[in-house]
Image: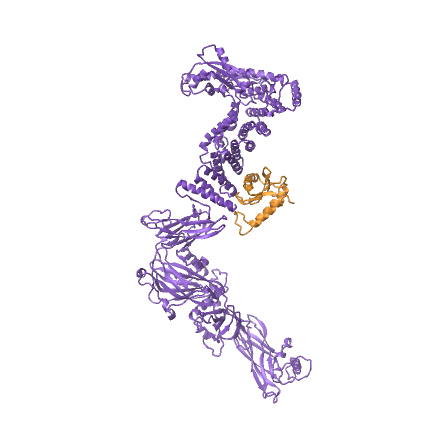
Chain colours: A purple, B orange
Amino acid sequence: MEALQHLKAELAKASSPAVMVLASPAVDAACGKNGLSLAELLRPFGIIRQLNGTVGVPVRTPAEHPLRLHSWRLRFYGAATMFQPSPEAADAHLRAVLAGGAGEEAGADPPDLQELLEAAAAGGGRAADATPWFRAYRREYLRLMQFGEHEATDHPVACVLALPSDYEGDLAAGFAALWRMPALPPLMQAGAMESAAVLRHYVLRPPPPPAGLGAWLSEGDISGLAAFVHELAVRGVISHMEARLRALNAQVTANRKGLKNQLKSLLWRKAGPASGGGSDSPATSAPGTPSAAAAAGSGGSPAAASYTPGSVEAAMRQLSDLALALGDYDTAASTLRLLASDTRADRAYKAYAGVQEALGAAAVLAGAPPSEAAACYKEALHRYSQLTTTNPRNREGVRYATRAVLLLSDYLRAVGQHADANWALMKAHFQEDDLRAGLLLEQAAHCLLALQPPHVRKFAFHLVLAGLRYDMCAQRSLAHRVYRLVLGVYRGRQWALIEEHLHDVLGRQAREAGDAAGAAQHFMAMLACPHNSPHCQRLYLTQFTEVLQAAQAQLGFPLVLSLPLPVVNCEHVGVQHDGQAAYSGVEAHQLSPQAWQGLEAALQPGLDVHPSSTWLDGGSRAARLNEGGEEGSTRCCCAGEAVGLDVELHNPLQLDLALTHLRLACSWEPAAGAAGGGQVPEGSPTGAQGSAGEQAFQLHEESVTLHGGERVVVHLRVVPLRPGTLQVHGLSWLLNGVAHGQAAFCIPQPCPRKPGSSSKVLIDAERPAPTGVSFRVLPPMPRLEVSVSGLPPTLLAGEVVRCTMRLRNSGAMSLHRLSMAAAAGTGIFLQPPSSPAEGSASSATAPAPPAAAGSSPSGGGGGPAELVSSLRQGTAVFRLPAVRLGVGQELELPVWFRAAHAGPTLFALAWRYEPLVHMEGLACRTLRFARSVEARPGLHLAARLAAGVGGCVPGGCLLQAQLHNLASDALLVTGLACPSRSWRLCEEAANSGDGSSSSRPSALRIGSDMSAALYRQLVPAERGAAAAQDTAGPLDSSLTGAEAGLLEASRHAAAVVAPKQLQPPAGQQQQQWQQQQRRRQQQDEEEGGADVVVLWQAGSQEGAPLRRGFTCLHNLRQHGAPPIAAQLRGPAHVRHDFGATPLCVVPLTLQLCNSMAAPATLAVELGKAEGQAAPLAAPTWAAAAEGSQAAGTALARSHSTLSSSSSAPVALVAAGALPPARQYAWCGRTRVLLPAVPPGQLVEVALSVVVQRPGKLAVTDCTVSWQFAQPPALSGSCTLPPLHVTVMPVASPQL
Amino acid sequence: MIVAAAVIAPNNSPLYLSTFGGDDESARLSTMVHCSLDAVEEKVAAGLRGTAPGDVPDAYLGLLSSEDELKVFGYVTNTRVKLVAVVDDPIVKDDEMRAQIFRRMHAAFVDAASNPFYQQGAPLASPRFDASIRTIATSLGAS
């Protein structure tokens, strides 16, 4: 409402009566001594608050409506100033006004968008505060658009003629001369302004004393002036206007109103254009009036036409404007409506638009509905714009349209119709010149902020358009301000194209303004533009480089910027520092930290004292161990040891970027309590100077060239030199040799944990702000370096390689309590150095400088190091308790590696050591060492233990080993071993009593891609003897100690890999579960499978070194062993004199062994193999005595047929086509039942067969069935493997 | 045809913005899409209407703005992801936009966002998604 009142006051002021002031030169000169003209002197008193006290002045309107004026206003103008300046002069003046207004405000920082939104929501004056220059511009613009020829608002209603009081001569003549002066307004001289009807008020002025600006105006002068103006208004102007109003009304009524005039007007106006010969001039009004119509005679556009002063239209306009000035809005509105219809009919659109504007003002002042006023203004806007649309050279229409839209937008904003205001301003800006278009666009944009919800994005877009217009008309400060305001809307919202455009414009503006540093900032923001073409990217980069060079030349020092190139991954930074755990190389990083922690956990000395009993204990212990390590709150490093940070850099462009002087930005603080030393802010490349003049750290610089789209990880190092705190904030670099860039790390910090809380994070805890990396720099510590020599890059799978491991203490203190851990399956074995072969390597050698050796005279430990190896948690642990390594001293140890399987293999081992002097914070250190090799396939071994094979002893089995050489060279198999508790290799020279045995066949050579098979019989070992033996003991002389160790580790690893019980038991069942486990373990050991080890050699040819290796299989179980081991035994050769006795009885023995733990019922059935009878005899039996093969076959068949029915002596039947018959028959019972065979017992059943003729026979049809009544309640049967018996006659057969 | 298509995240940052009218137009189209978000917010704040009472709200927002011969249409998903298309056809049917364009764009977006390697809120760089959007863009008016 405040805005509406303000607008109403403004409109009332604009429609208040104008008074012309004509002063003689003498009066002007006299007033000029005050610095003011007479009009200026009178002007402030034109505002009359109280007309005639509180009573007011009654005014009689033409419609006889009572009206009373209480406060009024007169506008005093000097006669010479009552004209409209030329557009050029007006624009020049307006530019000056804008420059004055904008110069102060536009330089300041643009307001925040939030502030603007709040101001827009508050409305009124606050919204206008965002663009203070516009207010002044608008005021001046409206002022300069006064005195239009098509409106009578500014026509003077009275004239004050002033002569000096000491005027000598005839006063009347003097006043008359004054009136005739050529200083009258141009319009009045042209006759457009009514001069005859102007009230002339004659004044004689005493000459005021000469003085400065108003300084000599006394109180009396001021009150005199006020009284004069009041008197003039009440006595002169009002009554004159009243009279003139009535006179004009009478004229209009006579000529325009009434039915007759209406009809006349209708006819004449319709006929007018037709009779005018196509001229669409507004011509005249009513016939008879001295209307000129001359103006339109040239056939010009209607816009150029206007009504002559004497026409009824001019009278109507005057009438309405006078009525408006007197506050008689009804008369004004009705007259204006009539005039509007007339002018519209006349197509005098300029006059029509002016009338609509006045109608709008009347509607606003009368408080009409907003739509009415808005419609009038919109019509005015439209018609004014049309003037320029039809005649583009006519800029007048645009100027008036702008005036109309200024009033319209103010009104609409005042009544809250911001969207309509935006529409009107946008519509008006199209035709305007750049400056005013920019201003209008800016206002249109601000209208959008007042909408609900605010259209912020459209606001920004309109501002961009405004900025463009400002830029085009060289209003740099305004354009700059607008763009900066817009940038706040878009920044950080990933609208890359728009941001790029804005930065481009801002950068160019700043460059043209000479602000190279500012331009560099904007051009820098455009650099990261991966969506652009390489050409464009190069252009941007060049542009930025040039500007930056200019800026650095201006400033005189290099500018360090937060360059977007390259993209630095500030959140994920790999930290490599040798705190508690150190990595010995790239390969060590291939293993996950969890795996390393598992290895290191096995090295903890406390584990021997309190072995973890359950997995729960073990887990918590491991977690506790980890807490002390890297997961702690601060990272530790030691003075003198490099700290490395892996930073990922990405080049988003398609160009190459050269980065030099790439280094970390660090600061150092001394430890709390340390003497002296403040913060050292930034490190120079050579290292920061501490307070004591020492270097606190040393930085290493890197250089890298990033190709297009490349993503690299750069390892940057800093070496702290003094204990304290080292803070790494970020990194800095030099781009393309010109631009200094920097980036700060913002590594997310984990949420703090409540002490003792089991939850991972506190939900409500505030996450600490991301920061850089800080290190606690500890005093110098021992540092172990491990290197291995002699390990080839490729191995054969299973090959055993002897290498030398060299341990060196490169730190600043002696170390001791060395221990090493390697996963059991890895295939690493450390030889006890005390063995004679490696005796020379066991003692620590000290090739270090004498100073280092002198610092620890006892370095190298006392005498030969003893090595204690053990297996712990699936990890092989080797300890060197007696070794002490001084500074710079070395120790060499023999080490064996073996890759069990083909493929890439990682040998990982962890060393743990302690400083000689216990330091706070770091009781021990570990070194993580790994070497990777590629293992090529070697000897492939497949083996099975086949039970129930003929010829095996009961309970024994046959080892079938298939060897296949996958290597490219020939391999020499030198031995086969089968270390087992329950089996041993059956040999002629069996070394009984040993739990394991091996055979050394004469070396078997297997060529590349060749196979070989080895068969060995295994017999059960004597259990009692085997149990007493230690299976882990040395196998044989064929296996070296290292190989035995590796084999043991391999076996252990295989046991670990075997499936375990996954579900941990609940607390109550734990003990029971442990018992079960123990029982199972015992059972496993009892039954224990066999290991098969094949020893081989390779490269034994000339030149190549001998390579040894072994391939092993662990825990082989018997394959296919029936619950009942049955074996048919008998003589292999029988000699019989068939001449003496036709039947030969061959005694056989059936050995049955119950291998189950329950008594079994056995049944032996003989001769019941009809189902497979047919093929039985043919290949196995050869008739030695018969001459004909066919006859023999027939005989065999008949025999088979017969013997199936009974086991009686066989009758020979010669039948040509009968199936082959058996050549033997079972004697005695064909079914033997053994009711209860106790477990483990060997039962022998005596059997016999009879043979009629000499020959080879295969005894096959013996079936053993079993049934276990008790658990495991098995039943089944098996047919025994054939027993081959050769029956020969005593005398050799006569051939 | 469609001259620009965009997928805007709920926080109004662009997940995908592709223009098919040439490079010189891309900044202007980008600005148009950006400005249309005001209209989206206005319409969403006013409440989405179903086609029938009790119906589920219609995700199709209709015409958001028009400038010269270009028209901007919008669609908002249940997760407040906005799909915006700028069309230069003088006559565009709402049904066609709803069914032919935005439903298919939505399906393509869902497919792209279902990629387990896609991180929510990150720009959609999937070439497959880009190809499907281009197919949809050229399909308008072709049928």
> What number of labels is visible?
0
Split into 4 quadrants, where in the image is the C terminus of chain B? Answer: top right
Seen in the picture, residue A541 relative to A160 is either above or below; the reply is: below
| Residue A870 at x, y percent in the picture | 41, 66
* Residue A215 seen in the figure: yes
Q: Which residue lies furthest to the bottom in this view?
A: A1140
Toward the front, the furthest residue is A298
Q: Position of residue A1192 (x, y in %)?
A: 65, 82
| Outermost right residue | A1216
Locate residue A392 relative to residue A656 in the image: left or right.
right
Query: From what the image shows, is residue A443 above or below residue A866?
Result: above
Residue A524 visible to an observer of this rendering:
no
**Residue appearing at x 68%, y 83% in the figure:** A1214
Tell me residue A50's x, y (percent): 49, 19
Vertical position of residue A731 compared to residue A1279: above or below:
above
Quadrant of the rendering where the N terminus of chain B is positioned: top right
Task: Name the one closer to the observer, A1080 or A1215.
Answer: A1215
Location of residue A1138 with respect to A1042 vertically, above or below: below
x%, y% of residue A1210? 65, 84
Q: Which of A114 and A739 is in front in this view?
A: A739
- The residue closer to the viewer here, A849 or A583, is A849
